[in-house]
Image (cartoon, rainbow, N blue to C red):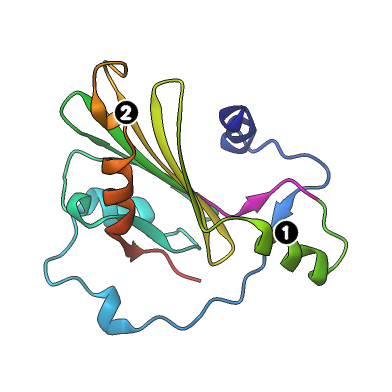
């Protein structure tokens, strides 16, 4: 079901009650944003116009054969992972009409900080930071036999190593 909601976003088709969240971003600490080694060009060029924080697991920040798809309100980055693919996406569009700020705050408060689940052979972590919806997935070539897609251990480890690699408010 989640994928069905993302597909319209990829093609720019939004319902009449949809839009872009206007978020007051905290000022980033410049020291934390500058990597000691420059990120690969595929990453820096791919996310240069993204208007939300871009997170990836730190162990993937320097992989040169990543695939980056992005616009100002959305990004997805995929990495090969020996018989699997790791994908992380961020999206600040919404498809729900909210009448006031209190209702919006109540909706955000009701969302758990992170959920880990397995669906259709794909291990997923879904979370919200800075008013942005993020998801990280591990999709295995042989999901029934690959523990990375049957156990939450790896997805939780990757989630614990997320770093901000770019994007801007």
The residue located at (68%, 58%) in the rendering is: 110
The residue located at (34%, 53%) in the rendering is: 159
Q: Is residue 33 left or right of 14 when viewed as pictured?
A: left
Residue reaching furthest left?
37
Tell me the CA gap for discs 1 and 2. Answer: 30 Å
Using the image as rendered, state which of residue 1 and residue 61 is in the foreground: 1
The residue located at (16%, 53%) in the rendering is: 62
From the image, tell me which residue sits under label 1. Answer: 107
Q: Could you tell me which secondary element the residue under label 1 belongs to? A: helix
Q: Position of residue 129 (x, y in %)?
A: 51, 63
Using the image as rendered, state which of residue 151 and residue 161 is in the foreground: 151
Residue 55's place in the image compared with 88, above or below, is below
The residue located at (62%, 27%) in the rendering is: 1
Which mark sits nearer the N-terminus, 1 or 2? 1
Q: Splitting the image into 4 quarters, where does residue 107 fall?
A: bottom right
Task: Check residue 90 in the rendering and tell me which mark sits there, or answer none.
Answer: none
Residue 149's place in the image compared with 50, above or below, is above
**Segment colored magenta:** 90-96
From the image, tell me which residue sits under label 2. Answer: 149
């Amino acid at each position: 079901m989640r994928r069905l909601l993302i597909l319209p976003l990829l093609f720019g088709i939004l319902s009449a009650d949809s839009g872009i969240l206007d978020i007051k971003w905290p000022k980033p600490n410049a020291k934390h944003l500058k990597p000691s080694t420059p990120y690969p060009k595929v990453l820096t060029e791919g996310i240069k116009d993204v208007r939300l924080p871009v997170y990836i697991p730190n162990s993937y920040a320097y992989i040169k054969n990543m695939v980056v798809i992005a616009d100002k309100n959305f990004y997805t980055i995929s990495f090969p992972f020996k018989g699997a693919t790791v994908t992380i996406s961020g999206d600040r569009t919404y498809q729900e009409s909210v009448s006031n700020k209190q209702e919006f705050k109540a909706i955000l408060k009701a969302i758990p900080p992170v959920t880990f689940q397995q669906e259709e052979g794909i291990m997923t972590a879904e979370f919200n930071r800075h008013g942005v919806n993020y998801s990280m997935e591990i999709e295995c070539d042989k999901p029934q036999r690959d523990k990375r897609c049957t156990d939450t251990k790896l997805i939780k480890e990757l989630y614990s190593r997320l770093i901000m690699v770019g994007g801007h408010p």
